[in-house]
Image (spheres, rainbow, N blue to C red):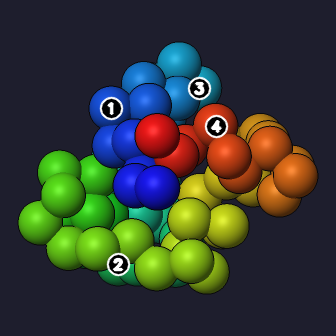
Amino acid sequence: MTINLNRLRAERIAKGLTQDEMANKLGWKTRTPYAKRENGLVSIGADELAKMTVILGYSLNEIEIFFT
């Protein structure tokens, strides 16, 4: 299984969040670390994906929507 980055991006946009806002919610000072992950330049860790899932309004039981 791989993380569906297009789904991650689509969910973020659907929730009305910018990359800057996602980065801030994840505790990062700039959008760069988030943007690199969303664009596939850096792998997303399990704990990071769990945080992203919750930020986007899903429970951890629904995390599978981000996998292909």
Left or right: 27 in relation to 9:
right
Q: Residues within 10 Å of mark 4 (few under 14, many from 20)?
A: few
Q: CA distance from mark 1 to mark 4?
A: 11 Å
Q: Considering only vertical position in the picture, is 56 above or below 47?
A: above
Type of the residue with mark 4: Ile
Residue at the farthest left position? 41
Query: Mark on residue 65?
Result: 4
Q: CA distance from mark 1 to mark 2?
A: 24 Å
Type of the residue with mark 1: Asn
Type of the residue with mark 2: Lys
Residue under label 2, please give it: 29
Residue under label 1, please give it: 6
Element marked by disc 1: helix
Q: CA distance from mark 1 to mark 3?
A: 14 Å
Query: Mark on residue 15?
Result: 3
Q: CA distance from mark 3 to mark 2?
A: 21 Å
Q: Tag 3 or tag 1, which sits nearer the N-term? A: 1
Q: Tag 4 or tag 1, which sits nearer the N-term? A: 1
Element marked by disc 2: loop
